[in-house]
Amino acid sequence: MVKILPSLLALSLSLSVVFAHGSHDLEKRAATTATCSKTYQAVAKGSYPALDCTPFTQDPMVLEWLKLVDFTKTPVYPPSKDGACPTDLTTIPKDQCWWTCQKCEAKGDITSCPKPGTWGLTYDDGPSPDSERLYDNLLSHNQKATLFIVGSRAISFPNTLKRAYKEGHHIAIHTWSHSAMTSLTNEQVVAELKWTEKAIFDTIGVTPLYWRPPYGDVDNRVRNIATQLGYKTAIWTQDFDTNDWNIPAGTATPQSVVDTFKTWLTKIPSMTTGFVVLQHDLFPQEVDVAINGVLPIAYQTKTLSMQPIAQCLSDAKPYKEGAGTFVLGAGSSASATSSGTSATPSVANSGKNTNAAVSLSAASSSSALVAVVAILAALY
Ligand SMILES: [Zn+2]
């Protein structure tokens, strides 16, 4: 804890104020550039770049990675300022397809799950000391998620990442320093992605094929580089942001997050596809609202099936090396796949299945009543 507390404090201090991002308010979670050295220092062998700072592109390791991308094929747009949209959105070229500013989705963007009622369950910005509480909750419900990992956090909490991988969660990339990617040069984009890939590979031995741009800040320039490096760009469904990240920022409350989630529950039945939700596990308040607010309701909502993104896309191999610990078909809430007519209660995935008595009460035989008593006795 002695070591953890100062790093948490540093994290909290580095959480700068919420800033306007066109019509979006976005959080900034990386250290400010003022704390990052502007003087190049080579990364020592076996080491990593400075935490929460965009890595230097003249590093020998980065120079090797740059050879993987043909920048003559990369569209040219001027880097943004911290990912902020211009006041006049019509000044953005249409073919830039900037997700946050133009609400533009490109071919290949993952922004939803195909099947209605399917929720692409994702958590960003970990691992953190609080991630363990989230993993405990997911484990107790045999629920898997996609975890978008910040490279700097992977280095800080490698054992937490190892646990997540071991428990079968889908591990994906969320950049090294959590910078707005459209604000970076082509070379910096490569460095952010590849250092994170390396940090994850060095920790768990697999190479993620999925990445999510911090703040959803991606355009066709950044997409092109990510695609050339072999990554699939996963964002989230427009407007399916829980705003959990605004709780530590002080502009949302646990109640407002739960209320937002409840409004989706009324929308979901009429949607023609599933959806992907933005949630986080960096700060304690984010994990608190997940395990005490959103997830308990979700587990009880029988029309929902929560799945890691790779699962909802039927992708059995979310890593360059293949499946790793990921098992397609394992660890999603089974509610949506159930017909709802079975008289046999399933208690395998949940400590308390409140539907057990309900589903069995339809049966009138005395043996069913005996079964109800036996199940309730076992549960409480
Ligand atoms: Zn993030």
Image (cartoon, grey):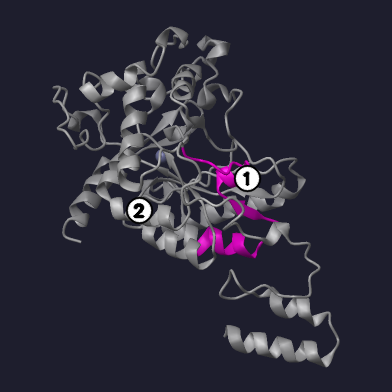
Residue under the image location 59 percent in, 41 percent down: 315
The residue that disc 2 covers is 162
The magenta stretch is 292-319
Quadrant containing ligand 1: top left
Task: Quadrant for the C terminus, please.
Answer: bottom right
110 vs 75: above or below: below
Q: Residue furthest front?
A: 321
Residue 173: tell me if it is visible: yes
Quarter-wise, where is residue 84 in the image? top left
Closer to the eye: label 1 or 2: 2
Quarter-wise, where is residue 355 in the image? bottom right
The residue that disc 1 covers is 312
Q: Residue furthest top?
A: 72
Q: Earlier in the sequence, mark 1 or mark 2?
A: 2
Question: Which secondary structure lies at badge 1?
Answer: helix
Q: Residues within 10 Å of mark 1 (few under 14, many from 20)?
A: many
Question: Which secondary structure lies at badge 2?
Answer: helix
| Pointers 1 and 2 in contact (C-beta within 8 Å) | no
Front-most of 50 and 207?
207
Residue under the image location 47 percent in, 52 percent down: 325
